[in-house]
Amino acid sequence: MPKGLYIHIPFCDHICTYCDFPKLLTKGQRHEAYIESLIRELQHYEKEVGFDEVQTIYIGGGTPTALSIEQLSPLFDYLAQVIHLDQLVEFSLEANPENLTEEKVRYLISQHVSRFSLGVQTFDETLLKTIGRKHCPQDVHRAVSLLQSYGITNINLDLIYSIPTQTLEQVRRDVEEAISLGVEHISAYSLIVEEHTPLYLAYMKDQLTLTDNELEAQMYQLVMDMLEKNGYHQYEISNFSKAAPSIHNQWYWRNETYFGIGLGAHGYIDGIRYQNTRSINTYIDVLTNGKLPVIESHALTMEERLEEEMFLGLRLSEGVDLAVISDKYGQNVEVLYQVAINQLIEKGYLMREDHRISLTRQGLLMANDVFEQFLLSI
Amino acid sequence: MSAINSEQIKERQKRIRNFSIIAHIDHGKTTLSDRILERTNALEKREMKNQLLDSMELERERGITIKLNAVQLTYKAKDGNEYILHLIDTPGHVDFTYEVSRSLAACEGAVLVVDAAQGIEAQTLANVYLALDNDLEILPLINKIDLPSADPERVKQEVEDIIGLPADDAVLASAKAGIGIEEILEQVVEKVPAPTGDPDAPLQALIFDSVYDQYRGIIASIRVVNGTMKKGQIIRMMATGAEYEVVEVGVHTPHEKIVDYLSVGDVGFVTASIKDVKTVRVGDTITSVENPAEEPLPGYRKLNPMVFCGLYPIDAARYNDLRDALEKLVLNDSSLQFEPETSQALGFGFRTGFLGLLHMDVIQERIEREFNIDLIATAPSVIYHVYLTDGTQLIVDNPSQMPEPQTIKSIEEPYVKASIMTPNDYVGPIMELCQKKRGVFIDMQYLDETRVHVNYEIPLGEIVYDFFDQLKSSTKGYASFDYELIGYKPSKLVKMDILLNGEIVDALSLIVHKDFAYSRGKVITEKLKEIIPRQQFEVPIQAAIGGKIIARSTIKALRKNVLAKCYGGDISRKRKLLEKQKEGKKRMKSVGSVEVPQEAFMAVLSMDED
């Protein structure tokens, strides 16, 4: 039974230019109907699968804090009925610095939310404009102080680097400022210009230049160096923490199962990966009619599970233990991947200690070239 | 089988009409064929899929006809008689002139389709002349008369002026709207002569096409000129002498229909469990062993390939599959030539000769689609005549085989006469383009107030680069273009080598004119830099002539390749990304230690810094 529960709140007060997650402008949407539908979907999984082993909840978006307490409360009320929220090992919620009010913080804490993840992205006002964020750097300082004043220490800041025109110096300042806030956890993602985003359109119209690959590599290394030096341990490709790595997110990398609830959410239950519809009307209609909003599901073969175990596990700095995996899958993984592993070690991308392999610094930079070697069928 | 009554056959022969449709691309030949099929009830409505005769996937996609097809139709004419019509399809593009001549050899008449707005195009002319050479009765049909821009009277006048055919009786039609279909069928019945052969004479059947079927062996498309062919008969291929027993004869209606016999004027197919593809040649005559004909039918104009390129399987293990594919294609396309060659960079492959660029394109796509072999094609080359200082002469169709410059006395290259028909607004850009392609102006004729015929002599080697594309873009697609080989002329040519990571890649070598070498070298090295993805190390690209570097660029090393993006629980997406990356690499060819994508081998074609 899944240990993680992800719930998606797709509403945003404005749309960021790089975002390709399922999202909708808050204004004029069917919020009540959406929350009701979320509850219907949860009810289905509660009945058919069960939440007995759920240890973590992650409410993400969109922008969960774009909704008011009144709009959110039916969801929390329902969760409290089916899960002992006070006994969760982690209850995370994503928030935007500008709409995290004191009232909301108080409410969320009363609902046992224990970890807050703030979408900071950058502290540079010009770059914030480029990526379409509406907060200002002061909002972040205010939000962090607010949370800290309520005794919340498990705070994550999301940073994005390799924003068009961003310089190495600007990245340095962003990381410095994030560190100065004394938060527990920092995620640093590199900006990907995805299709169907405003940024992509601008790129197609030649209105922006992508960051050069060499510069991007320098930025990533700078981020790693600075955070490591300041006591943030890099436990995953993009994730750094002082002492409390995100437990929920590790389900993904440890190939554990999790529920995905809400618009466009992805779940992994009992060997089946599934994805929900990205259309809010379909989502609401289908659930109102007592059906699931799943539009795609795929039962993984043993081979696919093994591949994922490898390429997800290698994202973690601790890497994967080949002996453990061999036991789990009943075949000698050492032999299966012998050629690939040896080549990758020779290239300096992988290192090995007993049965454990993990990425080197060079391997972190070129991780996709490592991961693809663990796909067996191609 | 019932005895065949010679009188009945002769009676039937009088009611046979064999015709094809000649048209420029886009002038509506396929739609017209469809309407004729519909009108003669060859197909139920529900069976009509658009463009029925174009059976190859590729043809339907590109809207062009490449392979011919023949269909037997029955038509009840206004005179009360029922006629047997054979509609033989022809390809429209200049590269397929050879196939056109094949289908025309099986006909007595041709419907000439001319667009009511665009008028006659250069290509149409070429095919009309072929038809006239074959003594075909030509029936003009002016199509798309329902277009707002249609000007049928002007087009009629054009037909008379340019082709010299009386156009008073030209059918005014709109194949799309079903107008004029009845009229053209009536004209076919009235004007196209019945076949004239003798059913009692020794068998002579012309093979105009053939395909290979896994179970039935070769299926040969034939036109019976004299005599009769039936099941059980022992037949002989007159050119190769091979003998077989006929298993079945039949026609396409367009569904395949087995018949008792094929006699004079019939256009159908024959199978005889023929497994050895080499014994059946398109253009050969089939006769009967029992009562053989003295002479084969005159074959038709066989064209020689003018454009060559190397074809290599990306996966070296598929070399034999590639040979099988080429052998099967040559079966019904004897203009295609190939012989084994070896490249240091690409391994084992074939030097393959084509009639032209479109032909080359089509063959490559057919191999990739129908035979599922991923290919690397080297840039097209022409045949050079090389005279060495020691007095010997070499024929070079592969740039990498060009001898060292100090041993060469002179090089000759093939020239074509390029005829470009264009609205006069575009004469300027066309002349500019032709000059850039080392063209020599011959003349210019006004066809009427608005349309001009521009003639140039241009090296074929320049045409095989992006001439078509450039012509299209500089005339907004209005110009049409035809070319014919006019012979060899000396040129100041040199071989340019391309080096990746310090090593010459033979498959990228090319022949260029000395005066253009520097600029070409620059464009090509820049283009390759764009096409070849960053590798895990820095890769210098150089262009060299006789060991001297004339241009260079550098592909910088890939320094970061990692999904450092927040994907949440969306693992499938990560997987897809990795799969795409790995598959992409598989489609590349390892040249030395550099992964090179397919397109790179065509990059030497690029002319402009765009």
Image (tube, coloured by chain):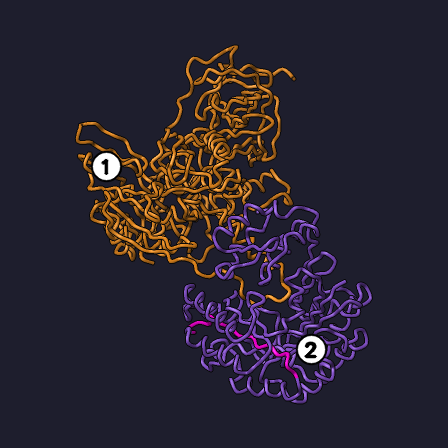
Chain colours: A purple, B orange
Residue closest to the eye, B458 or B94: B458
Q: Nearer the viewer, residue B34 or B151?
A: B34
- Amino acid type of the residue that numbered disc 2 sits on in the rendered structure: Arg
Percent position of residue B444, x then y: 23, 48
Picture coordinates of residue B39, whole percent (x, y): 58, 41
In percent of the image, x 55 and y 14: which residue is there?
B234
Q: Nearer the viewer, residue A88 or B58?
A: A88
Q: Which residue is mark 1?
A: B404
The magenta stretch is A152-166
Task: Give me the chain letter of mark 1.
Answer: B
Disc 1 is placed on an element classified as loop
Secondary structure beneath dot 2 equals: loop
Residue found 32% across the figure and 36% down from its top = B398
Location of residue A334 with respect to A224 vertically, above or below = above
Q: Which residue is label 2 attached to?
A: A30
Give the CA distance from mark 2 to mark 1. 77 Å
Q: Quadrant of residue B258?
A: top right
Q: Nearer the viewer, mark 2 or mark 1?
A: 1
x then y, percent, for residue A192: 51, 66
Instruction: Residue lying at the far top in this picture: please name it.
Output: B290
| Residue A74 in view (yes/no) | yes
